[in-house]
Amino acid sequence: MALIFDSHAHYDDQQFDEDREELLRTLKENGVGAILNMSSDYASIKKTVDLVEKYDFIYGAVGIHPENADEYNEEVRNEIIEILKGDKFKAVGEVGLDYYWESNPPKEVQIGVLRDQYEIAKSLGMPIILHDRESHEDILRIAKEYEGVVSVFHSYSGSVEMAREIMKIGGYIGVSGVLTFKNARKLPEVVKEVPLERLLIETDAPYMAPVPYRGKRNRSDYLMGVAEKIAEIKEITVEEVLHATAENMTRLLSL
Protein backbone atom coordinates (compact mmCIF):
# COMPACT_ATOMS: atom_id res chain seq x y z
CA MET A 1 0.00 0.00 0.00
CA ALA A 2 1.29 3.47 -0.89
CA LEU A 3 1.98 5.75 2.08
CA ILE A 4 0.29 9.06 2.86
CA PHE A 5 2.41 12.21 2.42
CA ASP A 6 0.69 15.04 4.29
CA SER A 7 1.78 18.16 2.44
CA HIS A 8 0.64 20.65 5.10
CA ALA A 9 0.27 20.24 8.87
CA HIS A 10 0.80 22.15 12.11
CA TYR A 11 1.85 19.54 14.69
CA ASP A 12 3.47 22.36 16.67
CA ASP A 13 -0.08 23.59 17.48
CA GLN A 14 -1.07 23.58 21.16
CA GLN A 15 -3.99 21.26 20.35
CA PHE A 16 -1.36 18.49 20.17
CA ASP A 17 0.46 19.36 23.41
CA GLU A 18 -1.13 16.60 25.50
CA ASP A 19 -0.48 13.59 23.25
CA ARG A 20 1.84 14.71 20.44
CA GLU A 21 4.43 11.96 20.84
CA GLU A 22 1.91 9.14 21.08
CA LEU A 23 -0.12 10.49 18.16
CA LEU A 24 2.88 10.86 15.84
CA ARG A 25 3.94 7.30 16.60
CA THR A 26 0.40 6.08 15.78
CA LEU A 27 0.42 7.97 12.47
CA LYS A 28 3.46 6.04 11.30
CA GLU A 29 1.72 2.79 12.18
CA ASN A 30 -1.38 3.96 10.27
CA GLY A 31 0.31 4.42 6.90
CA VAL A 32 1.62 7.99 7.11
CA GLY A 33 5.01 8.05 5.41
CA ALA A 34 5.92 11.74 5.65
CA ILE A 35 4.64 15.13 6.80
CA LEU A 36 5.59 18.69 5.88
CA ASN A 37 5.11 20.77 9.03
CA MET A 38 4.52 24.51 8.67
CA SER A 39 5.39 27.37 10.92
CA SER A 40 2.99 30.31 10.90
CA ASP A 41 3.92 32.88 13.53
CA TYR A 42 7.41 33.55 14.88
CA ALA A 43 6.96 31.33 17.98
CA SER A 44 6.00 28.33 15.85
CA ILE A 45 9.28 28.47 13.90
CA LYS A 46 11.22 27.18 16.92
CA LYS A 47 8.58 24.48 17.58
CA THR A 48 8.74 23.35 13.94
CA VAL A 49 12.55 23.14 14.14
CA ASP A 50 12.23 20.93 17.26
CA LEU A 51 9.74 18.59 15.53
CA VAL A 52 11.86 18.25 12.40
CA GLU A 53 14.94 17.45 14.47
CA LYS A 54 13.12 14.87 16.58
CA TYR A 55 11.13 12.92 13.95
CA ASP A 56 12.72 11.36 10.87
CA PHE A 57 9.48 11.48 8.83
CA ILE A 58 8.72 15.17 9.46
CA TYR A 59 10.14 17.84 7.15
CA GLY A 60 9.91 21.56 7.75
CA ALA A 61 8.70 24.74 6.08
CA VAL A 62 9.29 28.05 7.81
CA GLY A 63 7.84 31.48 7.16
CA ILE A 64 5.53 34.12 8.60
CA HIS A 65 1.78 33.81 7.95
CA PRO A 66 -0.08 36.91 6.71
CA GLU A 67 -2.05 37.19 9.97
CA ASN A 68 1.30 37.64 11.71
CA ALA A 69 2.96 39.83 9.05
CA ASP A 70 3.67 42.46 11.75
CA GLU A 71 6.21 40.05 13.29
CA TYR A 72 8.34 40.06 10.15
CA ASN A 73 11.56 42.11 10.14
CA GLU A 74 15.19 41.90 9.01
CA GLU A 75 16.21 39.79 12.02
CA VAL A 76 13.38 37.28 11.49
CA ARG A 77 14.20 37.18 7.77
CA ASN A 78 17.83 36.28 8.48
CA GLU A 79 16.78 33.62 10.99
CA ILE A 80 14.39 32.04 8.44
CA ILE A 81 17.17 31.93 5.83
CA GLU A 82 19.58 30.23 8.27
CA ILE A 83 17.00 27.59 9.26
CA LEU A 84 16.11 26.89 5.63
CA LYS A 85 19.73 25.96 4.95
CA GLY A 86 19.20 22.90 7.16
CA ASP A 87 18.91 19.51 5.43
CA LYS A 88 15.30 18.77 6.38
CA PHE A 89 13.89 22.23 5.69
CA LYS A 90 12.36 22.16 2.26
CA ALA A 91 10.02 25.12 1.67
CA VAL A 92 9.12 28.67 2.64
CA GLY A 93 5.76 28.57 4.38
CA GLU A 94 3.12 29.10 5.49
CA VAL A 95 3.02 32.55 3.92
CA GLY A 96 0.51 34.43 1.80
CA LEU A 97 -2.36 36.91 1.96
CA ASP A 98 -5.47 36.93 4.12
CA TYR A 99 -8.02 39.68 3.49
CA TYR A 100 -10.79 37.95 5.44
CA TRP A 101 -10.11 39.26 8.95
CA GLU A 102 -10.24 43.01 9.46
CA SER A 103 -7.89 42.58 12.43
CA ASN A 104 -5.10 41.38 10.10
CA PRO A 105 -2.22 43.69 9.16
CA PRO A 106 -3.01 46.09 6.28
CA LYS A 107 -2.95 44.65 2.75
CA GLU A 108 0.19 46.57 1.76
CA VAL A 109 2.05 45.15 4.79
CA GLN A 110 0.97 41.60 3.94
CA ILE A 111 1.98 42.06 0.29
CA GLY A 112 5.41 43.43 1.25
CA VAL A 113 6.07 40.49 3.58
CA LEU A 114 4.89 37.98 0.98
CA ARG A 115 7.12 39.46 -1.73
CA ASP A 116 10.09 39.40 0.62
CA GLN A 117 9.50 35.73 1.45
CA TYR A 118 9.18 34.98 -2.28
CA GLU A 119 12.65 36.53 -2.61
CA ILE A 120 13.93 34.09 0.03
CA ALA A 121 12.39 31.14 -1.84
CA LYS A 122 13.89 32.41 -5.10
CA SER A 123 17.37 32.83 -3.62
CA LEU A 124 17.31 29.34 -2.05
CA GLY A 125 15.64 27.60 -5.02
CA MET A 126 12.77 26.41 -2.82
CA PRO A 127 9.01 26.09 -3.28
CA ILE A 128 6.67 28.42 -1.37
CA ILE A 129 3.49 27.34 0.46
CA LEU A 130 0.70 29.89 0.08
CA HIS A 131 -2.26 30.77 2.28
CA ASP A 132 -4.86 32.57 0.14
CA ARG A 133 -8.02 33.84 1.77
CA GLU A 134 -10.21 36.34 -0.08
CA SER A 135 -7.07 37.47 -1.94
CA HIS A 136 -7.12 35.45 -5.19
CA GLU A 137 -6.32 38.30 -7.56
CA ASP A 138 -3.36 39.75 -5.66
CA ILE A 139 -1.76 36.44 -4.74
CA LEU A 140 -2.02 35.05 -8.27
CA ARG A 141 -0.46 38.24 -9.66
CA ILE A 142 2.50 37.94 -7.27
CA ALA A 143 2.89 34.20 -7.96
CA LYS A 144 3.08 35.01 -11.69
CA GLU A 145 5.77 37.63 -11.04
CA TYR A 146 7.84 34.90 -9.36
CA GLU A 147 7.23 32.25 -11.98
CA GLY A 148 10.66 30.72 -11.27
CA VAL A 149 9.49 29.80 -7.75
CA VAL A 150 7.14 26.80 -7.48
CA SER A 151 3.97 28.05 -5.77
CA VAL A 152 1.79 25.66 -3.76
CA PHE A 153 -1.74 26.94 -3.17
CA HIS A 154 -2.58 25.32 0.15
CA SER A 155 -6.17 24.30 0.94
CA TYR A 156 -7.19 25.56 -2.47
CA SER A 157 -10.38 27.64 -2.54
CA GLY A 158 -10.23 29.26 -5.97
CA SER A 159 -11.99 28.57 -9.25
CA VAL A 160 -11.18 26.12 -12.04
CA GLU A 161 -10.06 29.12 -14.13
CA MET A 162 -7.60 30.24 -11.45
CA ALA A 163 -6.32 26.65 -11.13
CA ARG A 164 -5.56 26.69 -14.87
CA GLU A 165 -3.51 29.87 -14.38
CA ILE A 166 -1.60 28.20 -11.53
CA MET A 167 -0.87 25.20 -13.76
CA LYS A 168 0.63 27.52 -16.39
CA ILE A 169 3.28 28.72 -13.93
CA GLY A 170 4.05 25.19 -12.72
CA GLY A 171 2.18 25.50 -9.41
CA TYR A 172 0.48 22.85 -7.29
CA ILE A 173 -2.99 22.63 -5.76
CA GLY A 174 -3.34 21.47 -2.14
CA VAL A 175 -6.55 19.52 -1.49
CA SER A 176 -7.84 19.41 2.09
CA GLY A 177 -10.72 17.77 3.96
CA VAL A 178 -13.02 20.46 2.51
CA LEU A 179 -13.30 18.20 -0.56
CA THR A 180 -15.38 15.75 1.49
CA PHE A 181 -17.85 18.38 2.78
CA LYS A 182 -21.41 18.23 1.41
CA ASN A 183 -21.32 21.94 0.55
CA ALA A 184 -18.03 21.72 -1.41
CA ARG A 185 -18.96 22.93 -4.88
CA LYS A 186 -15.93 24.38 -6.64
CA LEU A 187 -13.27 22.04 -5.23
CA PRO A 188 -14.63 18.80 -6.79
CA GLU A 189 -14.63 20.56 -10.18
CA VAL A 190 -11.05 21.70 -9.61
CA VAL A 191 -9.95 18.17 -8.66
CA LYS A 192 -11.59 16.82 -11.80
CA GLU A 193 -9.80 19.38 -13.98
CA VAL A 194 -6.31 19.44 -12.46
CA PRO A 195 -4.02 16.57 -13.54
CA LEU A 196 -2.99 14.18 -10.77
CA GLU A 197 0.67 15.23 -11.07
CA ARG A 198 -0.30 18.72 -9.88
CA LEU A 199 -2.38 17.71 -6.83
CA LEU A 200 -1.22 17.40 -3.22
CA ILE A 201 -3.22 16.14 -0.24
CA GLU A 202 -3.09 17.93 3.09
CA THR A 203 -4.69 18.02 6.50
CA ASP A 204 -3.88 21.54 7.73
CA ALA A 205 -3.99 19.62 11.05
CA PRO A 206 -5.40 20.29 13.59
CA TYR A 207 -7.92 22.10 11.36
CA MET A 208 -10.35 21.09 8.58
CA ALA A 209 -10.86 17.41 9.35
CA PRO A 210 -12.63 15.52 6.55
CA VAL A 211 -16.00 13.81 6.85
CA PRO A 212 -16.76 11.74 8.99
CA TYR A 213 -14.41 13.54 11.43
CA ARG A 214 -15.55 17.06 10.58
CA GLY A 215 -15.35 19.31 13.65
CA LYS A 216 -12.81 17.07 15.38
CA ARG A 217 -9.06 17.59 15.64
CA ASN A 218 -7.54 16.65 12.30
CA ARG A 219 -4.60 14.22 11.87
CA SER A 220 -2.63 12.89 8.92
CA ASP A 221 -4.13 9.40 8.77
CA TYR A 222 -7.55 11.01 8.14
CA LEU A 223 -6.20 11.91 4.68
CA MET A 224 -7.31 8.49 3.53
CA GLY A 225 -10.81 10.02 3.24
CA VAL A 226 -9.52 12.83 1.01
CA ALA A 227 -7.62 10.33 -1.17
CA GLU A 228 -10.79 8.22 -1.50
CA LYS A 229 -12.77 11.26 -2.64
CA ILE A 230 -10.14 12.22 -5.24
CA ALA A 231 -10.11 8.60 -6.47
CA GLU A 232 -13.90 8.67 -6.81
CA ILE A 233 -13.87 11.97 -8.77
CA LYS A 234 -11.03 10.90 -11.06
CA GLU A 235 -12.28 7.31 -11.39
CA ILE A 236 -8.96 5.80 -10.34
CA THR A 237 -7.79 3.79 -7.31
CA VAL A 238 -6.93 5.22 -3.88
CA GLU A 239 -3.53 3.57 -4.30
CA GLU A 240 -2.91 5.65 -7.45
CA VAL A 241 -3.88 8.86 -5.63
CA LEU A 242 -1.59 8.15 -2.67
CA HIS A 243 1.29 7.11 -4.91
CA ALA A 244 0.99 10.15 -7.19
CA THR A 245 0.58 12.74 -4.42
CA ALA A 246 3.56 11.27 -2.51
CA GLU A 247 5.62 11.34 -5.73
CA ASN A 248 4.59 14.96 -6.26
CA MET A 249 5.81 15.92 -2.78
CA THR A 250 9.05 13.99 -3.23
CA ARG A 251 9.69 15.89 -6.47
CA LEU A 252 8.56 19.24 -5.06
CA LEU A 253 10.82 19.01 -2.01
CA SER A 254 13.75 17.40 -3.89
CA LEU A 255 13.82 14.46 -1.47
Image (spheres, helix red, strand yellow):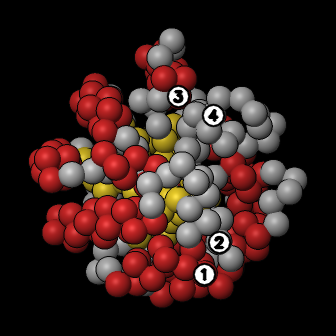
Q: Which residue is mark 3?
A: 27
Q: Earlier in the sequence, mark 4 or mark 1?
A: 1
Q: Nearer the viewer, mark 4 or mark 2?
A: 2
Residue at mark 4 to residue at mark 3: CA–CA distance = 12 Å
Residue at mark 1 to residue at mark 3: CA–CA distance = 34 Å
Q: Which residue is mark 1?
A: 162
The 10 Å Cα crowd at callout 3, few under 14, some 14 to 19, many 20 or more, is: some
Residue type at mark 4 is Asn
Residue type at mark 1 is Met
Q: Nearer the viewer, mark 1 or mark 3?
A: 1
Q: Earlier in the sequence, mark 1 or mark 3?
A: 3
Q: Helix or strand or loop: what does disc 1 sit on?
A: helix
Query: Could you tell me if residue 196 is visible in this image?
Result: yes
Percent x, y for residue 168? 48, 87
Residue type at mark 2 is Gly
Q: Helix or strand or loop: what does disc 2 sit on?
A: loop
Residue type at mark 3 is Leu
Q: Residue at x 57, y 74 (%)?
A: 136
| Nearest to the observer: residue 10 or residue 66 | 66
